[in-house]
Amino acid sequence: MDQPKYKHLDAILGGLLLVGMILALYMAFIGAPRERTMGDLQRIFYFHVPSGMMGLAAFAVNFFASLMYLIKKDRKWDSLALSATEVGLMFLTIVLVTGPIWAKPAWFVWWTWSPRLTSSLVLWILYLAYMLVRNYVPDPDRRAVMSAVFGIVAFVDAPIVFFSIRWWRDNHPSAMIETGDLDPLMRPAFYTCIAVFLILLVYLMRRRYFLESARLEAERLERLVDLAR
Amino acid sequence: MPGKVWVVFRKDLLIELRTKDSLNAMLFFGIVVLVVFNFALESVRDTIREAVPGVLWIAFVFSGTLGLNRMFAAEKENSCLQGLLMVPMDRGIIYLGKMLAATVFMLIAEVVIFVFSLVFFNLTVWAEIPYLVLVFVIGTLGFTTVGTLLSAIAANTRMREVLLPLILFPVVLPILVNAVEATRIILNTANYGALKLPLTILSTFTIIFGTLSYLLFDFVLED
């Protein structure tokens, strides 16, 4: 099986995370200035936006791993696709929970059906559907193929979902980051959070990947024991 | 290749015409959906015209899902799929044949459901018909291109029929959004110029997912 090849790397990543998370919390809650109109409410942005970015990154990893599985038929790509999706779903869940918490005081509603919100929700549902496909195919090889095909379809679908509902009026604050209008004083906290969330993404994906490899190995050994009996 | 696609297509069509299993269910279910919506929308009776495009497409995709579900379930009985796979031809041909058959069944169902909706919702259309046909055909193709692939995936799972709508509806959301939008433009405004955007997105989706499903179909059929 795939032994954790760089065992030290996980220890280093874990240590970095511990320090980085404390630093990120400090930067976001104390270091960054208070926003003029929204006040402290705006600070949720330091967790909401990086989570969204990491969610998308994780689904891109799933897409890549799914393609690689169909080309190479190597189980490790399937394990990677699974790990990426589970971690990505977690990040997207954070986005969907922190969003309404911010929206209620800012927009006076928990939810609006604006393109960005709708596509985030649809993305979340798409990858839950991916997990459903995985859960309902009993044979491991068939499962890997079916979920890889669905993973590719889901990832290609995501931008179409976004663009096809984009002409609806959008009141989601997004331009700030894309146009570089983010206040320079807020940037250190924002970039720190992105870096820490990226480490978290890599760390969690690695842990989940090794767990899955270990599970597959245990399954293989069980089959061997059964054969020997 | 068109000849081989025709053979697969004709096979599905013949089976359907002789048993009428799917088509009966699709028609009946589509009409039931219309009736149910009529009751569900009781409180907005005055503005029901606004809701017609959405109700129509929900009836279309619900009944279409029934048809897609049967497509591979029927092949699994008596190991018909094995026989089909043993024919020395590209798997993509099976995909194209089945996709076209599903499209035709769905279009037949749509025509009947639409006629019923004219009666139930008190609509009059004549000049709009060519535009509606265009939207129905492209929207249905978009739905069946990816639907055929996902139906084959669902047939591989333990849940079979239950799983298909769960994995299909999120994927075809762009189709639903744009088809409803296009139908709304035709039925409730006379501004046909506005059709360009939803029709472009529908066609783009159909081409992308047609190609993708054609390429991926090979993987999802059991060897």
Image (cartoon, coloured by chain):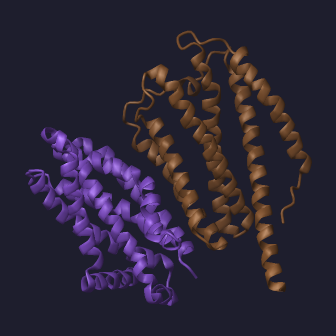
Residue B32 or B114: which is nearer the viewer? Answer: B32
Residue A13 or A170: which is nearer the viewer? Answer: A13
The image quadrant where one finds the C terminus of chain B is bottom right
Q: Residue at x 75, y 63 (%)?
A: A76
The image quadrant where one finds the N terminus of chain B is bottom left
B15, above or below B160, in the image: below
Q: Visible in this render: residue B190?
A: no
Number of numbered markers:
0
Q: Position of residue B64 (x, y in %)?
A: 32, 65
* Image position of A105 (left or right of A177): left
Q: Residue at x 53, y 25 (%)?
A: A102
B97, above or below B60, in the image: below
Q: Give the residue furthest to the top.
A: A36
User: Quarter-wise, where is residue A5 in the image?
Assistant: bottom right
Q: Position of residue A190 (x, y in %)?
A: 68, 24
Chain coloured brown here: A
Which color is chain B depicted in? purple
B159, above or below A11, in the image: below
Q: Position of residue B137 (x, y in %)?
A: 27, 61
Q: Position of residue B212 (x, y in %)?
A: 50, 63
Q: Visible in this render: residue A124?
A: yes
* Image position of B143 (left or right of A84): left
* Image position of B4 (left or right of A20): left
User: Quarter-wise, where is residue A11 in the image?
Assistant: top right
Residue B136 or A9: which is nearer the viewer? Answer: A9
